[in-house]
Amino acid sequence: MASALGGKRPVCDEDIRPVGALEEVLVQQLAFEFLRLGRLYKADVQVAPRGFKRVEQDLNHSVGFDAKGEAMDIRKELASELLLGYGNSVSKQIHRILDRLERLQRMRKGQPVRCAKSRAAGFN
Protein backbone atom coordinates (compact mmCIF):
# COMPACT_ATOMS: atom_id res chain seq x y z
CA MET A 1 0.00 0.00 0.00
CA ALA A 2 2.86 2.37 0.81
CA SER A 3 4.28 2.08 -2.71
CA ALA A 4 0.91 3.03 -4.23
CA LEU A 5 0.82 6.05 -1.94
CA GLY A 6 4.26 7.28 -2.89
CA GLY A 7 5.81 6.34 0.48
CA LYS A 8 3.47 8.64 2.42
CA ARG A 9 1.87 5.91 4.53
CA PRO A 10 4.88 5.03 6.73
CA VAL A 11 5.44 8.71 7.52
CA CYS A 12 1.78 9.11 8.51
CA ASP A 13 2.00 5.96 10.66
CA GLU A 14 5.07 7.27 12.49
CA ASP A 15 3.58 10.71 13.14
CA ILE A 16 0.03 9.70 14.02
CA ARG A 17 0.51 6.19 15.47
CA PRO A 18 -2.96 4.85 14.61
CA VAL A 19 -4.60 2.30 16.91
CA GLY A 20 -7.50 0.23 15.63
CA ALA A 21 -9.12 -0.26 12.28
CA LEU A 22 -10.89 3.10 12.08
CA GLU A 23 -7.72 5.09 12.79
CA GLU A 24 -5.89 2.93 10.22
CA VAL A 25 -8.52 3.77 7.59
CA LEU A 26 -8.28 7.48 8.38
CA VAL A 27 -4.48 7.36 8.08
CA GLN A 28 -4.85 5.64 4.69
CA GLN A 29 -7.27 8.36 3.60
CA LEU A 30 -4.87 11.03 4.83
CA ALA A 31 -1.95 9.50 2.93
CA PHE A 32 -4.10 9.35 -0.22
CA GLU A 33 -5.07 13.02 0.13
CA PHE A 34 -1.41 13.99 0.46
CA LEU A 35 -0.72 12.00 -2.71
CA ARG A 36 -3.50 13.93 -4.46
CA LEU A 37 -2.03 17.20 -3.19
CA GLY A 38 1.37 16.27 -4.61
CA ARG A 39 -0.19 15.50 -7.98
CA LEU A 40 -2.01 18.83 -7.86
CA TYR A 41 1.26 20.68 -7.23
CA LYS A 42 2.83 18.94 -10.24
CA ALA A 43 -0.10 19.97 -12.44
CA ASP A 44 0.07 23.53 -11.12
CA VAL A 45 3.77 23.74 -11.98
CA GLN A 46 2.84 22.92 -15.58
CA VAL A 47 -0.15 25.25 -15.84
CA ALA A 48 1.12 28.32 -13.96
CA PRO A 49 3.95 29.32 -16.35
CA ARG A 50 1.55 29.25 -19.31
CA GLY A 51 -0.87 31.44 -17.40
CA PHE A 52 1.84 33.92 -16.46
CA LYS A 53 3.09 34.01 -20.05
CA ARG A 54 -0.43 34.71 -21.31
CA VAL A 55 -0.90 37.55 -18.80
CA GLU A 56 2.45 39.04 -19.84
CA GLN A 57 1.46 38.85 -23.51
CA ASP A 58 -1.89 40.48 -22.80
CA LEU A 59 -0.21 43.30 -20.88
CA ASN A 60 2.33 43.90 -23.66
CA HIS A 61 -0.19 43.77 -26.53
CA SER A 62 -3.50 45.52 -26.33
CA VAL A 63 -4.95 43.65 -29.31
CA GLY A 64 -8.61 42.67 -29.54
CA PHE A 65 -9.64 39.03 -29.62
CA ASP A 66 -11.95 37.25 -32.00
CA ALA A 67 -14.61 34.83 -30.77
CA LYS A 68 -12.30 31.84 -31.10
CA GLY A 69 -9.50 33.58 -29.15
CA GLU A 70 -11.90 34.48 -26.34
CA ALA A 71 -13.00 30.87 -26.02
CA MET A 72 -9.36 29.83 -25.66
CA ASP A 73 -8.82 32.44 -22.95
CA ILE A 74 -11.82 31.15 -21.04
CA ARG A 75 -10.52 27.58 -21.20
CA LYS A 76 -7.10 28.64 -19.89
CA GLU A 77 -8.68 30.57 -17.04
CA LEU A 78 -10.91 27.61 -16.23
CA ALA A 79 -7.90 25.28 -16.02
CA SER A 80 -6.27 27.41 -13.34
CA GLU A 81 -9.60 27.94 -11.57
CA LEU A 82 -10.24 24.19 -11.58
CA LEU A 83 -6.80 23.54 -10.08
CA LEU A 84 -7.43 26.15 -7.40
CA GLY A 85 -10.82 24.67 -6.55
CA TYR A 86 -9.42 21.15 -6.53
CA GLY A 87 -6.59 22.28 -4.24
CA ASN A 88 -9.05 23.85 -1.82
CA SER A 89 -11.12 20.67 -1.83
CA VAL A 90 -8.08 18.50 -1.07
CA SER A 91 -6.98 20.85 1.73
CA LYS A 92 -10.43 20.79 3.32
CA GLN A 93 -10.50 16.99 3.12
CA ILE A 94 -7.09 16.79 4.83
CA HIS A 95 -8.34 19.04 7.64
CA ARG A 96 -11.51 16.95 8.03
CA ILE A 97 -9.53 13.72 8.27
CA LEU A 98 -7.11 15.23 10.79
CA ASP A 99 -10.06 16.49 12.84
CA ARG A 100 -11.67 13.01 12.81
CA LEU A 101 -8.39 11.42 13.84
CA GLU A 102 -7.91 13.89 16.66
CA ARG A 103 -11.44 13.33 17.96
CA LEU A 104 -11.10 9.55 17.73
CA GLN A 105 -7.74 9.54 19.50
CA ARG A 106 -9.01 11.88 22.23
CA MET A 107 -12.00 9.62 22.84
CA ARG A 108 -9.75 6.55 22.95
CA LYS A 109 -7.44 8.25 25.48
CA GLY A 110 -10.34 9.51 27.61
CA GLN A 111 -9.58 13.16 26.88
CA PRO A 112 -12.29 15.81 26.43
CA VAL A 113 -13.66 16.14 22.90
CA ARG A 114 -15.01 19.44 21.58
CA CYS A 115 -18.49 19.41 20.10
CA ALA A 116 -18.95 20.06 16.37
CA LYS A 117 -20.40 23.56 16.81
CA SER A 118 -17.48 24.85 18.89
CA ARG A 119 -14.98 23.37 16.38
CA ALA A 120 -16.73 25.10 13.50
CA ALA A 121 -16.73 28.40 15.37
CA GLY A 122 -13.03 28.06 16.21
CA PHE A 123 -13.45 27.75 19.98
CA ASN A 124 -10.98 25.57 21.89
Image (spheres, grey):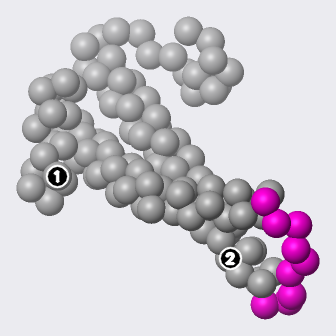
The residue under label 2 is 75
Where residue 81 appears, as percent x and y from the top left, is 65, 60
| Location of residue 58 (image quadrant) | bottom right
- The amino acid type, in three-letter code, at marker 1 is Gly
Depth check, front residue: 98 or 79 = 79
**Which of the two discs, 1 and 2, labels the residue nearer the N terminus?**
1
Mark in front: 1 vs 2: 2
Q: CA distance from mark 1 to mark 2?
A: 31 Å
Determine whether the residue tagged by mark 1 lies in a helix, strand or loop.
loop
Where residue 73 appears, as percent x and y from the top left, is 74, 74
Residue drawn at x 14%, y 59% as measured from the top left: 4
Q: Which residues are magenta?
A: 60-68
| Location of residue 3 (image quadrant) | bottom left
Q: Is residue 34 above or below residue 13?
A: below
Residue drawn at x 86%, y 87% as measured from the top left: 66
Residue drawn at x 52%, y 42% as measured from the top left: 92
Can the viewer see residue 21?
no
Where residue 76 appears, as percent x and y from the top left, is 65, 71
- The amino acid type, in three-letter code, at marker 2 is Arg
In the picture, measured across the screen, residue 55 lies left or right of residue 89, that is right
Q: How many marks?
A: 2
In the picture, measured across the screen, residue 94 lies left or right of residue 88, that is left
Mark number, residue 6: 1
Where residue 120 appears, as percent x and y from the top left, is 63, 26
Q: Is residue 124 above or below residue 118?
A: above
Q: Identify the residue at the far front of this view.
A: 60
Q: Are marks 1 and 2 in contact (CB under 8 Å)?
A: no
